[in-house]
Image (cartoon, rainbow, N blue to C red):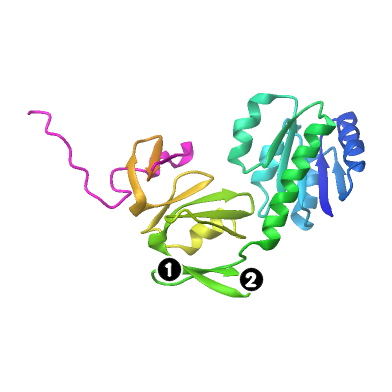
Amino acid sequence: MIRFVLVDDNESQLKHLSQKLALIPGMHLEGSFVSSAEALEFLQNHTVDVAFLDIEMPGLSGMELVKQLNKAPLIIFVSSFPHFAIDSYELDAIDYLLKPVTTDRLLLSIKKAERLLEQLQQSNHEIKPSEQAFFIKDGTTYVKIHFDELLYVQSQNNFVILFLQNGKKHLVLVNLKQFEEQVPDTLFVRISRTHIVNKSKVTAFDHQSVKVQHIDLGIGTTYQHLINEGTFGLPVIKRNSGN
């Protein structure tokens, strides 16, 4: 059963989406809101799996609503405007639906949410840091991951994916902020809303991106001033302009 809420200041749009979701097995409506402020209050006090959010709403936009949540459900934005899509993924939205929403497109979005929720139920649920490594909980067992094994960390809403040097990935049920608080900033640096990198694994960088092995990761606008020549712990040898 997927528990969800709907938020849209347009009542006819809200009714249209509600009717479509009512026909999909396994979906349970927890609340329907035309006021984003009321939706925010509800989400701060209730646990749901998925929130379908309009973006442009009076007072508090859908994106602003998400930013104010300490622990957000899976977010699916529903909008008439395609140009908000890129910004939505910076908030870890799992999908972006354009109005009017078709049943086929809605079903694809629901299947994506089902897969992610299933992964969350099976995922590692804890991080326990030590001096040179940390443990992640896999079932009832704690598995050690050395800092040197970890290339970078990617946010996926309320959990993170750890990308290891050997090509393996681990899903951990903590958000990126919680992960950042538990690992040393001498070894790791956050470069965007969605990524933390292992400083020792960075092979190249400029003011817009860092390269970790062969992977380019963008530096978020609000983090660009934090990334400089001293960030990665190595001296920068500059060419003498007089030669």
| Residues tagged 2 and 1 counted as in contact (Cβ below 8 A) | no
**Residue 73 can be seen, yes or no:** no
Residue found 91% across the figure and 34% down from its top: 15
- Magenta stretch: helix, strand or loop mostly: loop
Q: Is residue 127 visible?
A: yes
Q: Residue at x 82, y 52 (%)?
A: 2
Reply yes or no: does residue 215 show up in magenta: yes
**Which residue is labeled 2 in the image?**
139
Q: Amino acid at mark 1?
A: Ala
Query: Image quadrant for the N terminus?
Result: bottom right
User: Sequence order check: which comes first, mark 2 or mark 1?
Assistant: 1
Asked if residue 24 lies in the magenta stretch, the reply is no
Foreground residue among 225 and 78 = 78
Which one is closest to the eye, mark 2 or mark 1? Answer: 2
On screen, residue 135 above or below 95: below
Residue 137 picture location, percent across and down: 58, 69
Answer with the quarter of the image where residue 177 lies.
Answer: bottom right
Towards the viewer: 137 or 60: 137
Where does label 1 land, which residue?
Answer: 133
The disc labelled 2 sits on which kind of residue?
A: Gly
For residue 37, which numbered disc appears in the image? Answer: none
Query: Residue 118 at what x, y percent from top left?
Result: 72, 56
Q: Residue at x 32, y 50 (%)?
A: 232
Residue range highlighted in magenta = 214-243
Measuring from the top left, give residue 145's x and y in whole percent.
46, 66
Vertical order, 97 against 124 (above or below): above
Between 56 and 5, the one lying in front of the other is 5
The CA span between labels 2 and 1 is 19 Å
Q: Position of residue 11 (x, y in %)?
A: 89, 32
Q: In the displayed structure, does residue 96 sit left or right of residue 196?
A: right
SS label for mark 1: strand
